[in-house]
Image: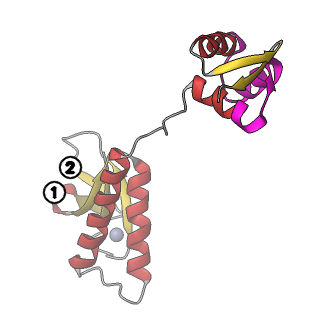
Amino acid sequence: MYYVWVCPKCKSHSQITYITRADQKTTGCQNCKKRIDIRKIRILGSFDDRNDAVTLRSALHAQVTGPLGSIESGEIFKEIIKENMEKNEKQMNAPKVPKKASPDKIIENIIKKNGKTSLDQIVKCCMEEGIEKEKTVQMISKMLYAGIIYEPSKKVYDIVK
Ligand SMILES: [Zn+2]
């Protein structure tokens, strides 16, 4: 777990410490080098992901050095932490990978875009979408059978209107 905290001694240096052991008792300030009792530090955020900890620390630094900066005013940090947590939550709820169009939709779109399209052209476009030739050919047969496309001339396909 990554903890973002501010040194109680020098108070101007927020830092990230990675604590794995539950029995770890002290940590060192990267700025004033003081050994600090972990139980006494004010944890401003704890994160599984280091990037999230870095985001919060960057926000803290901006606050600390900015005109509103006051390390004593916990309100600022509460706001930042809240914002950060909400952001994390949103990211976690968001779908990780955008849903990919199914192969038949991809083929349909290729033919719609090009008009009468040769098999080679369809295969080439499908390859660019990560669909293997075999799969494309199979899908074309299915679409022919389903009456979605037809074959106006040999190995040339068009959408059934
Ligand atoms: Zn310090």
Q: Which mark is residue 23?
A: none
Compared to 110, does 17 lie above or below?
A: below
Residue name at image x 69 percent, y 12 percent: 137
User: Which type of secondary structure does the marked residue at label 2 adopt?
Assistant: loop
Could you tell me residue 2's position as x and y percent? 33, 49
* Res 32 visible: no
Mark 2 or 1, nearer chain start? 2
Could you tell me residue 117's position as x and y percent? 79, 26
Which residues are the magenta region?
Answer: 111-134
Q: Which mark is residue 25?
A: 2
Could you tell me residue 31's position as x and y percent? 41, 68
Q: Amino acid at mark 1?
A: Arg
Question: Ligand 1 lies in which image quarter?
Answer: bottom left
Q: Residues within 10 Å of mark 2 (few under 14, many from 20)?
A: few
Q: Amino acid at mark 2?
A: Lys
Type of secondary structure dominating the magenta stretch: helix
Could you tell me residue 135's position as x and y percent? 64, 13
Depth check, front residue: 121 or 96: 121
Q: Nearer the viewer, mark 2 or mark 1?
A: 1
Q: Is mark 1 within 8 Å of ligand 1?
A: no
Judge from the rendering whether residue 155 lies leftward or rightward of residue 62; answer left or right: right
Residue name at image x 38 percent, y 63 percent: 56
- In the rendered image, the quadrant that contains the C terminus is top right
Compared to 145, does 114 lie above or below?
A: below
Question: Is 133 within the magenta?
Answer: yes
Distance from Cα at disc 2 to Cα at disc 1: 7 Å
Residue name at image x 29 percent, y 79 percent: 71
- In the rendered image, the quadrant that contains the N terminus is top left
Q: Which mark is residue 39?
A: 1
